[in-house]
Image (spheres, helix red, strand yellow):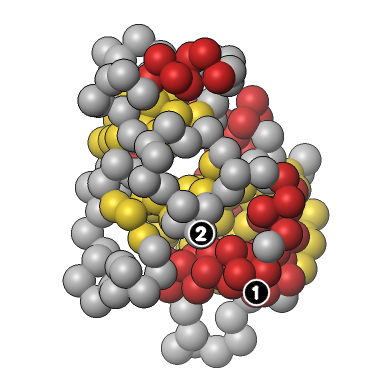
Amino acid sequence: MNLQVKLIVTTEETLKNIIINELKLKRISKQSLDLYEWKHEKEDEINDIILCYCDTKNIKKSLEQIKELYIIEKILLIWNSQIIKNQDIEIWDIIIPNTFLDKSWENPIFIDYAVWENYDLNKFWLILNWIDHNIDEISDENINSLKESWYSDIADKDSYELLCALDKDELTKTVVIRNCIQSEKDKDNQYIINNLINIFEIMI
């Protein structure tokens, strides 16, 4: 019988290593997947936690294989975001968008978050319910063009494809966490890392 798990998915090695170290996850061998696991020891403890590290092109295949092995209770999709057009965002902010637009703006994906009653959003610099626009190539020119539109707050290359790999039931169990950075060196900023750790530990 498949085990119930809470699943964390990231496409970034830096975030993978942070989560592995913080949760003390152990590598497990399952098919061709890059998986890491935290197993509960007592019946009254929370479900096992599985971390899946993969690139965006393989996300759908990876999720299909994971669903053959586990019953997924919750999904966290977490990654850094340098592709930000809104000037009000600081590097320590964490965005949790709920609307995701494809390149043509024709097939939006909505996530209905219902988990915020007991959270102090200001304490963790959380920003909720923003619109994320998926684009093919990142350049100053196309990011600047987005600044002229009112219907998108942030832009990236991954989020829409990640969510397309999930069915409707899985989307109701999903939280997307976007960690805001401005450069590669921000990935090693301990202040930013600590805030991110606080968030995903609450969410999971």
In the depicted view, which residue is nearer to us: 155 or 101? 155
Q: What is the x, y in percent for residue 113? A: 25, 53
* Rendering quarter of residue 1: bottom right
**Which residue sits at x=54%, y=26%?**
157
Q: Secondary structure at mark 1?
A: helix
- Labelled disc at residue 92: 2
**Which residue sits at x=67%, y=53%?**
186
Vertical arrangement, residue 174 with respect to residue 23, above or below: above
Residue 53 visible here: yes
Question: Would you name the residue on which mark 1 appears?
Answer: 23
Vertical arrangement, residue 101 with respect to residue 21, above or below: above
In the depicted view, which residue is nearer to us: 175 or 149? 149
Residue 9 vs residue 54: left or right? left
Of circles 1 and 2, which is in front? 2
**Residue type marked 1:** Leu
Q: What is the x, y in percent for residue 2? A: 54, 58
Q: Earlier in the sequence, mark 1 or mark 2?
A: 1
Vertical arrangement, residue 5 with respect to residue 76, above or below: below
**Which residue sits at x=67%, y=74%?**
22
Q: CA distance from mark 1 to mark 2?
A: 21 Å
